[in-house]
Image (spheres, helix red, strand yellow):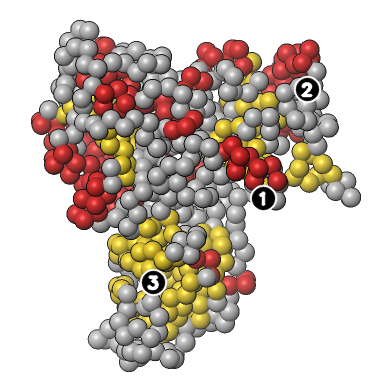
């Protein structure tokens, strides 16, 4: 309810996942983020733009923290994945509101009579937990594209066609560059090293009997979230994001045959979609000068007209086609596409196709009329990607352009809602800086396998911040209309000084260092070689997800071997060994912090949902984000800290914050600005020093 007259009537939280205050400050100083500079001058921020972040520095728990003002141990979404009770090697994805145990501020503002729009907030927003008519919620089920888990009909592709190719087809994760040749059988997939046993009966049992409870909501589709049994063995999943192959379609180029209407001089090839289950015939077309400069893509050879025609080196939005979903239903999908190169003689072609997104499904829009009005005016939500491969064309001509498109689309959609539906409060999330950065982040420092110098990769990163700045700038005029704007992020992305170590990978159990220290033991094959399965009869402890260590405890864990009486001293030994562990290359310790569960409450990370030990990797080895302290800094002006800038009614102009605004402070600060209750479970405090009036 309204407690007092607020300092402003309207607030928009502009959340940009992965936005780095340190890099933003460097960009401002270089004159490359004029809109953010203007917002800082109009409002309040620290000199370094830093907000003191909560941990772990992973998407779902931190967006939940921003919404509730609670630390993860209190709001319940403690990581990207949550441990399956009693199963040390099984995790479940944690985006859904059924895991959120604290009151989000949007329920409070709606109850106070404020028309509230929650936009793509991936931390306990979906499904809505209030039926108040003032509350509107769009997505929140995933990071990345709006509807990324719910509406994706197909994957992203590199498409190669040549006269040299004899054997075409589709191969998953085999597109390691847009500059390849040969036959599909010669292309080797590059996938994450994670080892998962999909036949494990525990996964099916838990998924059907426990995980699905509370998920029978509007917009949920089977397979949308995963329960997994995974072991990180020999690498780090985030470290591989910049190198992971994307799906590859290859085809011979031949003379047209069997077409209803093939233009004179055209050449034929085939695009293989849906892991090779859907084929699209295509023609390479000549221009008036006799040079091949266009591609026409057809639903079938029997059709007299193409679905769409693509010009060489032109980014083309919303290429519509009909595709089957995972149940075989035919749905209207939309892709973005770009023909990167056509040889003038028509004998070689390379192109890119984005993921295909369902263009007509409104299941994750509440109420549904928002979808109808937005899509009618601005088209469907764009696909997004994080393909990198150190391929300049894929990153700069495809990925970055698509993220800029997504930013414009989201700004247009939210501003339409503001202008036409009397919205008072917006909680918005945009994932661009994060997923765009994952495509190249580790190469912001020269590595042994770098294709480009780090100075070139910095240009890619600057482009990410250029369109992020345009996105922010499009909202600044709303300050003159009475809106207060808070620009913030959940975390940033760091370029580590050293290559990854086998500790702190968020996907599952991390074997490497814990095996070397003797706490985690793998089973052996008949030749005595390790196989990626835990030997539970000999394993005393495992490090799982980004920051957690579990003792394999009798009476609690299914395969427990450690007596509860020995638990504390074993934890002491593990902590001591972790602090003493030195990197073989540098001789430096690799762990920044390790705490007993009871002590981890100091970080908001202890309690019954956390492991027995909470640990943080030293910033030197943190890969992108997740496993380090939130204060970590890296190479080339990168860090893991979130950003905080506020401007507009109720905020002091040109004010430099002396201390730190904390991540848990955003929700109560917003509540005081609006004059509504602070969320019931909030652990933060209003950032009173930035207000124009004392409270």
Mark 1 and mark 3: span between their CA atoms?
A: 39 Å
What numbered label is drawn on residue 554? 2
User: How many numbered tags mark residues here?
Assistant: 3
Q: Residues within 10 Å of mark 2 (few under 14, many from 20)?
A: some
Vertical order, 507 against 199 (above or below): above
Residue 420 in which image quadrant: top left
For mark 3, does the 10 Å Cα neighbourhood hold few (<14), some (14 to 19), or many (20 or more) residues? some
Where disc 1 sits, the SS reads loop
Which residue is depicted at the point 26% across and 11% down? Answer: 689
Decide if residue 526 is in sight here: yes
CA gap, disc 2 to disc 3?
61 Å
The answer to whether the residue labelled 2 contacts the one labelled 3, judged by CB atoms less than 8 Å apart, is no
The residue singled out by tag 3 in the image is 341
Task: Give percent across and percent down for residue 496.
Answer: 52, 36
Residue that sits furthest to the left in the current view = 480
Q: Which residue is mark 1?
A: 198
Residue that protrudes farthest toward the top in the picture: 694
């Amino acid at each position: 309810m309204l407690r007092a007259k607020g300092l402003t009537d309207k607030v928009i939280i502009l959340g940009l996942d992965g936005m780095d205050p340190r890099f933003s400050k460097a960009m401002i100083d270089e004159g490359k983020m004029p809109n953010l500079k203007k917002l800082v001058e109009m409002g309040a921020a620290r000199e370094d733009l830093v907000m003191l972040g909560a941990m772990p520095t992973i998407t779902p728990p931190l967006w939940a923290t921003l919404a509730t003002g609670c630390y993860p141990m209190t709001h319940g979404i403690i990581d990207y994945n949550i441990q399956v009770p009693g199963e040390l090697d099984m995790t479940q994805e944690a985006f859904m509101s059924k895991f959120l145990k604290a009151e989000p501020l949007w329920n409070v503002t709606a109850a106070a009579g404020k028309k509230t729009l929650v936009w793509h907030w991936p931390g306990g927003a979906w499904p809505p937990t209030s039926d108040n008519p003032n509350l509107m919620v769009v997505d929140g089920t995933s990071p990345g594209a709006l509807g990324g888990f719910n509406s994706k009909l197909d994957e992203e592709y590199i498409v190669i066609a040549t006269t040299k190719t004899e054997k075409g087809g589709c191969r998953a994760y085999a597109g390691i560059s847009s500059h390849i040749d040969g036959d599909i059988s010669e292309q080797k997939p590059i996938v994450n090293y994670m080892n998962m046993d999909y036949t494990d009966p525990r996964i099916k049992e838990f998924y059907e009997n426990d995980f699905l409870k509370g998920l029978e909501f509007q917009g949920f589709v089977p397979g949308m979230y995963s329960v997994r049994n995974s072991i990180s063995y020999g690498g780090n999943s985030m470290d591989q994001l910049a190198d992971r192959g994307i799906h590859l379609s290859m085809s011979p180029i031949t003379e047209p045959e069997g077409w209803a209407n093939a233009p004179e001089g055209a050449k034929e090839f085939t695009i293989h979609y849906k892991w090779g289950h859907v084929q699209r015939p295509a023609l390479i077309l000549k221009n008036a000068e006799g040079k091949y400069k266009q591609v026409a893509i057809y639903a079938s050879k029997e059709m007299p007209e193409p679905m769409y025609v693509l010009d060489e080196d032109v980014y083309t939005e919303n290429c519509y086609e009909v595709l089957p979903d995972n149940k075989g239903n035919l749905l209207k999908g939309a892709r973005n596409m770009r023909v990167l190169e056509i040889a003038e003689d028509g004998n070689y072609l390379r192109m890119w196709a984005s993921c295909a997104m369902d263009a007509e499904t409104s299941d994750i829009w509440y109420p549904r009329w928002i979808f109808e009005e937005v899509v009618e005016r601005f088209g469907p939500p764009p696909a997004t990607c994080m393909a990198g491969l150190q391929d300049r064309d894929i990153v700069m001509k495809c990925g970055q352009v698509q993220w800029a498109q997504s930013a414009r689309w989201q700004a247009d959609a939210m501003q339409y809602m503001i202008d036409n539906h009397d919205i008072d409060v917006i909680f918005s999330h945009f994932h661009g800086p994060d997923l765009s950065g994952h495509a190249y982040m580790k190469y912001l420092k020269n590595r042994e396998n770098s294709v480009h110098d780090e100075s070139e990769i910095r240009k890619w990163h600057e482009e990410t911040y250029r369109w992020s700045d345009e996105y922010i700038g499009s909202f600044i005029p709303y300050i003159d209309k009475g809106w207060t704007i808070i620009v913030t992020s959940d975390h940033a992305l760091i370029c580590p000084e050293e290559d990854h170590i086998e500790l702190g990978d968020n996907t599952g159990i991390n074997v490497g260092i814990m095996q070397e220290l003797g706490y985690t033991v793998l089973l052996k094959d008949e030749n005595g070689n390790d196989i990626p399965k835990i030997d539970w009869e000999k394993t005393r402890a495992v490090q799982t997800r980004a920051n957690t260590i579990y003792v394999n405890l009798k009476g609690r864990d299914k395969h427990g071997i450690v007596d509860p009486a020995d638990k504390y001293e074993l934890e002491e030994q593990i902590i001591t060994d972790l602090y003493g562990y030195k990197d073989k290359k540098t001789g430096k310790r690799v762990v920044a912090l390790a705490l007993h569960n009871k002590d981890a409450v100091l970080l908001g990370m202890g309690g019954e949902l956390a492991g027995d030990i909470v640990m943080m990797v030293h910033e030197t080895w943190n890969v992108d984000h997740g496993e380090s302290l939130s204060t970590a800094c890296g190479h080339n002006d990168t860090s893991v800290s979130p950003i905080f800038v506020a401007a507009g009614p109720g905020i002091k102009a040109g004010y430099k914050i002396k201390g730190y605004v904390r991540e848990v402070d955003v929700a109560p600060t917003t509540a005081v600005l609006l004059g509504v209750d602070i969320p019931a479970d909030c652990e933060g405090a209003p950032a009173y020093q930035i207000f124009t009036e004392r409270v």
